[in-house]
Image (cartoon, rainbow, N blue to C red):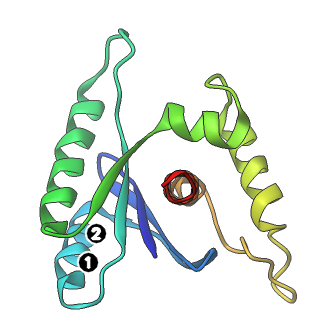
Amino acid sequence: MILALDPGTTETALVVLHEGRIALHDKQPNDWVLGFLWGYRSLPRPTLAVEMIASYGMPVGKEVFETCVWIGRFVQAWQPGEFAYVYRRDVKLHLCGSPKAKDPNVRQALLDLYGPQGTKKAPGPTYGLKADEWAALAVAETYRAKVALERRAA
């Protein structure tokens, strides 16, 4: 089981991937997510996969640093549980085969993997996912594939 986060300055998207299926998806204020992570301590805990920020030499603004602080707080709240940082570049390479892929390309790759969203009457496996929740699913899928590859190599 994987709990994946796509952190932001004020809100964070989260997805729980369980046995290859989306068990939960949501986007909540960061304080709520922090409380959720602290509260999860008494339950069997999945691996926490957090999208991590990387610098490629370009200037960044205040929002990036605020997001970094939240990432640290989320990881601290999860301790001593297992966690991993997943970089956006790795997500794009895994799902699209190119670091230049854009969000619509990543979303389409996820739809190809998991299936169509469907409708309210006939919901598909990705039904209800919106905006940053797609990025959280991409983090979960990239981490899942990395672990599977490492197990095959061992």
User: How far across and down, in percent of the image, does residue 82 sit?
Assistant: 26, 65
- Label 2: few (<14), some or many (≥20) within 10 Å? many
Q: Is residue 45 above or below residue 70?
A: below
As helix, strand or loop, the secondary structure at mark 2 comes to helix
User: How far across and down, in percent of the image, does residue 143 sit?
Assistant: 49, 54
Residue contact at pointers 1 and 2, CB within 8 angstroms: yes
Name the residue type under label 1.
Answer: Phe
Write down the quadrant of residue 35 in the picture: bottom left
- Residues 75 and 81: in front is 81
| Residue at 53% over, 54% down | 132
Number of residue marks: 2
User: How far across and down, in percent of the image, does residue 123 sit?
Assistant: 80, 82
Q: Is residue 100 above or below residue 63?
A: above
Location of mark 1 (residue): 36
Specify whether 84 is left or right of 74. Answer: right
Location of mark 2 (residue): 33
- Label 1: few (<14), some or many (≥20) within 10 Å? some
User: How far across and down, in percent of the image, does residue 50 sit?
Assistant: 36, 53
| Residue at 76% over, 66% down | 114
Name the residue type under label 2.
Answer: Val
As helix, strand or loop, the secondary structure at mark 1 comes to helix
Q: Is residue 38 above or below residue 110?
A: below
Write down the quadrant of residue 122 in the picture: bottom right
